[in-house]
Amino acid sequence: MIGHLQRSDKDVPARCLVIDLEATCSDDGAVPRDEMEIIEIGAVIADRPNWAPLAEFQTFVRPVRHPELTPFCRELTGIEQCDVDAALQFPAALASLTDWLAEWPDAVFCSWGGYDLRQFRRDCQLHNVTCSFAEPHINLKEEYAARFQLKRGRGLQWVLDDRGIPFDGRPHRGIDDARNIVRLLPLIFAIE
Ligand code: AMP
Ligand code: MG
């Protein structure tokens, strides 16, 4: 084997729930890291052997700590103030996601890096609710780096550029990020 590590059938989940979150943020310290809150949940179900998308879920979420989005956050994500003003707060959004997920009980939560899991935990703690699907979690950034023997985990855009795959949609929109992550599953989970 040259260039990538061998993966056996048993290491590969049958079905993935790929989630990408967007959150309140700033470039001037107005939203401290530990006060970030989810403003969009994008989720795509995909399964073996082709990892074609089977179902999608998207919702905006209304933040409570910093309800006014910063210009930086609106620019980064393309999410407008009216999108979050009209949205449910996190507990109701999570309940809606969990209801949708009931159809896919075997799907394993995957995301690009550890951020999305940490942010779910932070919002659950803030609102004193629990997340039924948080464990197990597959860090696809680490999986990709291990499989292709990168020295460190790389951002989604870096990997797509490296593969010559144009980003489909708008980067830093949760549902578009999730869709583009799903396009990499055949590479990450290919079985020799
Ligand atoms: P992403 O999935 O890469 O779009 O990032 C998720 C969230 O992380 C974003 O909604 C922002 O809250 C935050 N974030 C991403 N990139 C940056 C950045 N360059 N500066 C500040 N926050 C960021
Ligand atoms: Mg994103």
Image (spheres, rainbow, N blue to C red):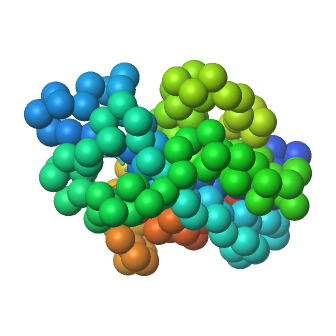
Instruction: Give 5 or 176, whichever is nearer the viewer.
Output: 176
In which quadrant will I find the C terminus?
bottom right
- Residue visible at 47% across and 68% down? 176
- Work out whether residue 17 can be spotted: yes
Is any part of residue 181 visible from this angle? no
Please state which of residues 148 and 132 is positioned toward the viewer in this rendering. 132
* Residue at the (33%, 63%) spot, across then down: 82
Q: How far from the left and from the top, in percent, is residue 89? A: 53, 44
Q: Residue at x 26, y 48 (%)?
A: 69
168 or 93, nearer to the observer: 93
Q: Is residue 179 above or below residue 66?
A: below
Give the left or right position of residue 49, taking residue 190 as reference.
right
Task: Say left or right for 99 vs 92.
Answer: right
Identify the image quadrant of residue 170.
bottom left
Q: Is residue 73 left or right of residue 95?
A: left
Q: How many marks?
A: 0
Residue 12 picture location, percent across and down: 79, 50
Relative placement, left or right, of 134 versus 166 is right
Residue at image coords 44%, 60%: 86
x, y (%) of residue 107?
81, 52
Outermost front residue: 86
Residue 169 on image: x %, y %: 40, 76
The residue closer to the viewer here, 62 or 106, is 62
Q: Residue furthest left?
A: 28
